[in-house]
Amino acid sequence: MTPGKGLEWTQLSIFVVLFALVTVLGFAAARWKAAASLDHLDEWGLGGRKFGSWITWFLVGGDLYTAYTFVAVPALVFGAGAMGFFALPYTVILYPIVFLPALRMWSVSRSRGYVTPADFVRGRFGSPTLALLIAITGIVATMPYIALQLTGLEAVLRTMGLNGGGIVGHLPLLIAFIILALYTYQSGLRAPALIAFVKDGLIYVVILIAVFYLPAKLGGWSHIIDASAAKLAQPNPKTHAPSGSVLLTGTNQLQYITLALGSALALFLYPHSITGVLASRGRNVIKRNMMALPAYSFLLGLLALLGYVAIAAGVKPITNAATGNADSNTVVPVLFDLQFPAWFAGVAFAAIGIGALVPAAIMSIAAANLWTRNIYKEYLRRNATPAQEAKQAKLASLVVKFGAVAFILFIDPQFSIDLQLIGGVLILQTLPSVAIALYTRWLHRWGLIAGWAVGMAWGLIMLYSIPNPVTGRAHFGGSALPLGKLSIFGWHPFSGSTMQIYPGFVALIANLVVVVLVTIIARAMKVFNGTDDTEGTDYHADEHDKDLRPIGAH
């Protein structure tokens, strides 16, 4: 059947059955490795801080490799070519970069009972203001990330024929997210941890079959790459320039490098990434996972190649009935719909759909933890009990989820993609306060606040100035800033250059320069730098230390 016309009942039936399975698992997870009560953030929000190597591997993998990864990376390769492969070096260099900071963050959080990165900042610098800025940045950067999981789920629903206009067209999505909200509310982090086993198993089976079967069916990789090169070289009717290339060009190599490095620095600053680390049982669990998680990078490379396979197969994205625009996120679902039997396509769609739920659940829990610990408890209810904190986090997780649904319902999904790009630039500005502060307290808290403000402002100004000639968008049109447009108080140091760079990387450099300068001034003036609640031994604590803080202690 042609995708997008009529309901695909076989695919839909398999999708619903597998979705029902993970729903049962989600509710059953409340009793899995359960403590006497989930009425504590250590239990509801961090799974009791006792996940071992296998559970953590599936949880963090399910957290970082999302449904949006499964549909957007191939879609970017489909539309632009080699630039879409930036995700490969990014995930290769990611784990060595975060190996040591992740261990120190786990130790100090386990020692002091920290649940969020903002908790650590609050304890390290004694600054509620700086902690509030880190918390708000985390929540704002996470919201569109959750919304982007919905675009992956909607792409699958649309391919199965559920492509209505208006609110009715979004009804299946709403039902799916209500179910997700209910079992996350009940089971906390245990729900996505348990479901991640099913999700990752399905994904691995589907992708491995696809990358062996499809090239054989379509004439081999040589033909697929040649067909992709020819298609990408054709001029875009709106820009009159080639839409992409199977090789990087002189203008986008720097963009490729800085986007990969910037993304690698940003990923473990996201609250949901840190949540996965803090839920681990001990430092050895994190060490083993940092060595094993690159297996997902191999999977990501195979996924990216499906963008070229879709070009060779003549795939055309489905038009979104709600907006009238072609939905590029449907490229991989349409490929599976056209090239595989209906039953296997149904399994693949379920894998992508469930792949949306796992990270969406973890992200909503991480954002809820930030709200509860660093805004509600800090500013609204200082004497909140652990049970009141847990209740507040459960309610906040519902608000965050339905806030993300509102992005899809009331804003053009293309705009939510732009917001995710903004999210990456924003979260990068927390690197000095969160990651560098794990190693040194030399940086002054007022320097960190000033650097955060400068990085945020300049990053947003640069993003605002980027147009998208294909869609006609004048602002927030992409992540590639031509160096010729880089302005420092009106000075253009690279005037005329067409080489592109990732704005988040530039904003982070400005942030660090300001942090250092203000720190030097503040120290010279002997400005008080707050009280550090942590001790040197806190950064090396491990699970079997005899004086370790009990889990669930207030």
Image: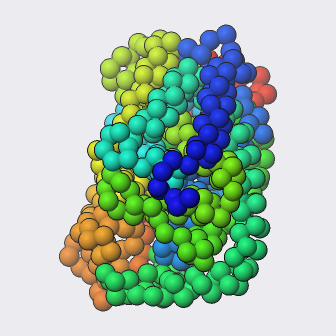
Residue shown at the point (55%, 14%) measured from the top left: 39
| Side (left or right) of 276 relative to 155 | right
Q: Quadrant of the C terminus?
A: top right
Q: Is residue 487 above or below residue 442?
A: below
Depth order, front residue of 476/289: 476
Counting labels gives: 0
In the image, residue 479 above or below residue 337: below
Residue 74 in picture, x, y percent from top left: 56, 66
Q: Position of residue 250 (x, y in %)?
A: 48, 88
Residue at the extreme left: 490
| Residue shown at 41% from the left, 37% from the top | 171
In-image side of 302 versus 508 (left or right) = right
Depth order, front residue of 351/314:
314
Whole-percent x, y for residue 309 in the image: 63, 73
Q: Is residue 446 above or below residue 401?
A: below
Relative to 41, is 180 above or below? below
The scheme the figure's colours follow is rainbow
Depth check, front residue: 282 or 361 = 361
Query: In this orientation, does residue 434 appear?
Result: no
Residue at 56%, 58% (x, y): give it: 1
Residue 123, position as x, y percentages in the image: 48, 32
